[in-house]
Image (cartoon, rainbow, N blue to C red):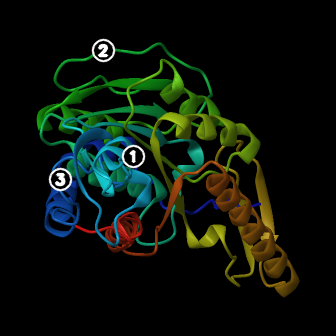
Amino acid sequence: MARAAAVTSPTPRPALLADRSEAVLSRLQLLVTRKLDGLLQGDYAGLLPGPGSEAGESREYRPGDDVRRMDWPVTARTTTPHVRRTVADRELETWLALDLSASLDFGTGQWLKREVVVAAAAAITHLTVRGGNRIGAVIGTGGGASAPARRWRGTPPPAGPGVLTRLPARSGRKEAQGLLRTVAGTTIQPGRGDLGALIEMLNRPPRRRGVAVVVSDFLAPAEQWARPLRKLRVRHDVLAIEVIDPRELELPDVGVLPVVDPETGELHEVQTADPRLRQRYADAAAAQRATIAAALRGAGAAHLRLRTDRDWLLDMVRFVAAQRHARTRGTTR
C-alpha cells in the first residue's frame, strides 16, 4: 500500500538531472564540509566512530575504562590492572549499496527520494574519503538483472538500465567525485529491483573489514534483504539509511486521487475523503515501517531515517552526534 505514488508527482527528466548534477554535487560538498566535518574524531573514524581494531600499548586501568579492554597477561605480571589501548585503522574502506529502484523516483516534500539518496551518498563520501581511505559502491536500478563488475579510470561509466553495477573502491577525491557523478547520473528504470541481491554484492567477494552503508526505502519484503544484511553485519559496521516520503505514511484528504505503483505501473483511484480508508492506510504504513525497523535492528545495523520533507543534513548531524555519544559513553578520552 505504501508504495503507491501520485501520478502527478514531480519527476525530473534524466537530461535535467544530468545538467544539474555538477551544481548539486558542488553544493552538497559545501554543505557537508561546513556542517559535518569536525564532528568525527580523527581522520579515520568513519561515519560510525569508535575505538580502533589494532592492538596498541597497555596502560594502567583508570575508573571509567571499558573492562572489555583489560590486558590480563600484563595485569597478571604486574599485579596492577592494565587496559590495552587500540589504534584506529590507518585506512578505512567504505562501501555504499544505493537502491535506485523505481519507488525512489517519487517525492512530495522538499526533495525527491532519489535526491535524498544522492545527498546521503555525497555526505558519506566526503566524510570518509581522506587519508588514503577508499570508497566504492554498488548501484541497483529496476529490472532485477545483474551485470559483472566493471573497472573504470577517472569518471566511471554510467550505470546501465535494469542492472546491478559495481564501482570498485578507490581512494582520492577525484575518484570519489567520479563515483558521485555516476550515482547522480543513473537513470531510474521501471520494474522491481532486488534489494537482497544488491546487498549480497557487498558480501561477495569477501572484503576487508570496514563500513557498509545501505541507502534505500526498504519497501521490498523484509525476508528478501534481512538475511544478506545480517550476513554483512558479521564482518562490517553497517549503517542503514531509510528514505521515506510523508505520503507513504498518510494520505491527504483531497478527494479522488489517482495513484500508481511505480514498479509495476498498476493504477488505482482512491477516495481519500473517506476517513476510515485514510486511517487504514496510516495503520498499514506504520506497521510496515515497524517491520522494517525491527528487521534492521535484528540485523544489528545502525538505523538512520531521512525524510523528503525534513532537513536531511540536520538529521544526519544529529545521528552522527548520537552515535559518537553512544560509542564513547563510559570511557575516558
Q: What element carries label 1?
A: helix
Nearer mark to the viewer, of 1 and 3:
1
Any part of residue 194 in sight: no
Residue for badge 1: 72
Q: Is residue 324 above or below residue 274?
A: above
User: Does 120 appear above or below 257?
Assistant: above
- Amino acid type, mark 2: Arg
Say which of 110 and 60 sits in front. Answer: 60
Residue designated by label 3: 23
Query: Which of pointers 1 and 2 lies earlier in the amino acid sequence?
Result: 1
Q: Quadrant of the N terminus?
A: bottom right
Within-10-Å neighbours for mark 3: few <14, some 14–19, many 20+: few
- Where does the image place residue 52, in percent across and percent down from the top left? 29, 46
Q: What residue type is labelled 1?
A: Trp
| Label located before the other in sequence (1 or 3) | 3
> Is 7 on the left-hand or right-hand side of 172?
right
Mark 2 secondary-structure assignment: loop
Residue at the spot x=19%, y=65% of the render? 31
Disc 1 crowd, CA 10 A, few/some/many (<14, 14-19, 20+): some
Q: Which residue is drawn at 68% across and 37% down?
A: 227
> On the picture, is 30 further left or further right than 49?
left
Q: Mark 2 points at which residue?
A: 151
Residue depicted at x 39% and y 68%: 319
Residue 105 or residue 128, whichever sits in front: 128
* Res 92 → quadrant: top left
